[in-house]
Image (cartoon, grey):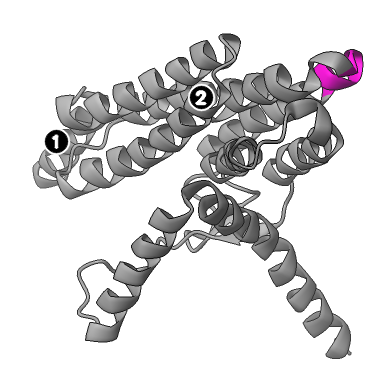
Amino acid sequence: MPDDLNDRKPMNLRRRSIYLLPNILTTAALFAGFYAIVQAMNSKFEFAAIAIFIAMVLDGLDGRVARLTRTQSEFGAEYDSLSDMVSFGVAPSLLMYEWAFKDLGKLGWFAAFIYCAGTALRLARFNANIETVDKRFFQGLPSPAAAAVIAGFVWVMLDNHFIGQETRWYAVTLTVFAGLSMVSNVRFYSFKDFNMRKSVPFIVIFLVALFFILISIDPPGVLFLLFLCYALSGYVLWLLGFHKKTSHPTT
């Protein structure tokens, strides 16, 4: 019995502790989201979109750093969710509203709210089901990917000299799609079973280099298409699974 208590005590202390390194990254992601909101309010939409992508990168780093350094904690998990709500919920919805929805009246803020509420519900469900879901898949579109779709769309339209009024109906459709996808039961591959420590063939490193070259050629276009394909991938997997079930009915 004493051995069991000794084994559990460090885990409980670790879960209640506050660690500096991963929370610095979470704070940086939160700042990027706040910066995106400020820039959207000042009509600097391209800066806002880029800031959301920066927040996404930082959000991806904080959890990995916490796991690698064994500094996971309950505080860090809750702080990360609050940061995600700002960076991937409020910032993208406000960016889209300021850029394209202002002249749509109630429909505009309703579409933006659908996305914002979808993010909050997605994060709450993720936290509630974190111990029970299949780690290989996300239930619903992850909020960083949804934010990347929204920010990528604004960025690519600005890069091609379109204004929000010209593309507002496409923007409404994409925003509502992203918001509803986050609260859907559609499964999206999580890449969490990808082993970064495993050896890979040389060609893989070469393909990674080509990928970065491709992004450097047209960052907004490539990033938007990349995350749009990911947002559609869950529905493709669902359709393939649906056809499998219908083609092999149970007896």
Residue 124 found in image quarter: top right
Comparing 92 with 163, the one in front is 163
Are there few (<14), some (14-19), or many (20+) residues within 10 Å of tag 1? Answer: few
The span picked out in magenta is: 104-110
Q: Which residue is mark 2?
A: 48
Q: Which mark is residue 10?
A: 1
Please give left or right for residue 96 compared with residue 152 in the image.
Answer: right
Question: Can you tell which of label 1 and label 2 is closer to the viewer?
Answer: 2
Residue drawn at the location 45% of the way across and 15% of the way down: 34
Would you say 87 lies left or right of 156 here?
left
Q: Position of residue 160 (x, y in %)?
A: 64, 42
Q: Residue at x 66, y 36 (%)?
A: 161
What amino acid type is highlighted by mark number 1?
Answer: Pro
Task: Single out the residue that lies furthest toward the front.
Answer: 161
Q: Is residue 59 above or below residue 44?
A: below
- Quadrant of the image occupied by residue 45: top right
Residue 142 visible: yes
Q: CA distance from mark 1 to mark 2?
A: 42 Å
Between disc 1 and disc 2, whose residue precedes? Answer: 1
In the rendered structure, the answer to whether residue 50 lies left or right of residue 95 reads left
- Helix, strand or loop status at disc 2: helix
**Crowd tier of the residue under label 2, counting other residues whose Cα lies within 10 Å: few below 14, some 14–19, many 20 or above:** many
| Magenta stretch encompasses residue 240 | no
Disc 2 marks a residue whose amino acid type is Ala
Q: Report if residue 201 is visible in the image.
A: no
Give me the disc on residue 101: none
Q: Residue at x 72, y 20 (%)?
A: 97
Q: Quadrant of the C terminus?
A: bottom right
Q: Secondary structure at mark 1?
A: helix
Q: Is residue 205 above or below residue 25?
A: below
- The x and y percentages for residue 85 are 53, 24
**Residue found 17% across the figure and 30% down from its top:** 21
